[in-house]
Image (cartoon, helix red, strand yellow):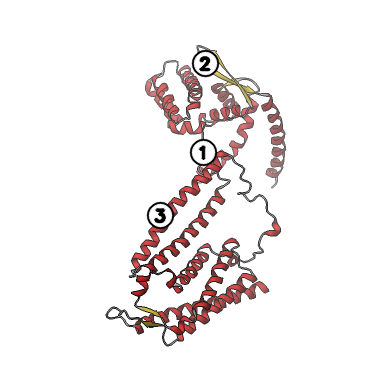
Amino acid sequence: MELVDRYINAVQRYLPEDKRTDIGRELSSHLLDQLESQQDELGRKLTDDEVAATLQLWGHPRQVAATYVPPTPLVSSELMPVYKQTLIYVFGLIFLLQCLGSSIHFLQTDYFKTLQFLMQLLFGFFDSAATAFMVVTLLFYAYSAGGADNSWLLSKQWRVQDLPSVSRPWQQMSAGDLLTDLATSAFLLIVLWYPLWMSAETLASIRVALNPEIQQWVPWLSALLVVSVLANLWWVWRPYWTKLTLSINVVLNLGFSLSFLLLWLSPALLVGTDNPLPTLLTIADLDRVLRNIFLLAGLFCIYEVGRDLYRLRQLSR
Amino acid sequence: MTENRLDKMRGELRRGVLVLAVLSSLKQPHYGYSLRKQLQDAGIDIDEGTLYPLVRRLAEQGLLDSEWQQAEGRERRYYQLSTLGGELLQQLTEEWQQLNGALGNLLEQP
């Protein structure tokens, strides 16, 4: 019965050390009983091929070991929804921080390359996200395997009355939209306050600056952006469109659309500095590009105002 | 595809009552292979990969007592229902009969 011994040894390899002997002993007993019964039926000794065929039917040693000691999943099925939710929030936060980090880095350099900025953003995000994924998974593994009290994680203390009154599919805010809005507002805030982040050398070598008339708008725009960041942070916690959140969004978008359209109508957004612009590029060209961006952004905000007013009407019915 | 689905659902259906079948069979002591034969003879065909680990798990939960015995020149582990297992079997049997009766009524409906 050398084949049986080989098979049992192979199964034992996949078992925890403290269970190897006992399970191996029991498995051996089951196998020998089965082979003996087959011999009795045939009335002769089994050939090695017949023994091998029977063992083959039992399955791969790793599979058999797993039926005796099922592998512990990294995250238990009970914790899986919380785990996925945590990963979404953590990835969102990392993306936001990466946007801020890359923006500050971009303002601190004396040149700007779009592709380099995007690559830095992308690779920085994946690098941090991979580490975060590992840490979150290990924490959940420790929780799943340790059998610790996880009732607080599973939100067992909840009341139906506290659930949001959501009757339309669009009332659920998308995580992607929330993060995009957060990242955009934070990015614009950093760009508006570039003198705070830029090094003295970079500031000295800057080729264009905001027109002093436009500069007066910075506090007003900053206030709008800060409110937008705070509102979005609140909505990450309660991501539902209600009358209140829709109203706030209408006010914010009205403010943004008004600002963007006024910027679009401004005769000059930028002024040159003592440092010359590269050849083939003029202040007027940059102004035109910026104005077009402001026009599109303003129209988009107006669309959002219209959409949210329509939704407010729907909720009021 | 339909056969696969049927096999899967049949497996799920049987898995739930296996514990009951095993506990019930182990009112008398059995070693692994003899338990499997008894279940087979009763019309419950369970593959080794499911039955033997299940018996072990039930023993680890204290529902079965086990003892190694020498017989026919070989050692075998005999399993038998423990006191705790007997109590659980009684409760599960009542539960099963109640469920079976309710299900029977449902299935008889036109």
Residue name at image x 40 percent, y 25 percent = A52
The disc at residue A148 is none
Q: Which residue is mark 1?
A: A72
Mark 2 vs mark 1, CA separation in Å = 31 Å
Decide: is A188 above or below A83.
Answer: below
Q: The residue marked by circle 1 belongs to what chain?
A: A
Q: Secondary structure at mark 3?
A: helix
Amino acid type indicated by mark 2: Glu
Q: Do the residues marked 3 and 1 share a common chain?
A: yes
Residue under pointer 3? A127
Q: Is residue A80 left or right of residue B81?
A: left
- For image coordinates 35% across by 74% down, the residue present is A204
Q: Chain of mark 2?
A: B
- Label 3 marks which chain's residue? A
In the image, taking residue A273 as reference, residue B62 lies left or right, namely right
Labelled disc at residue B75: 2
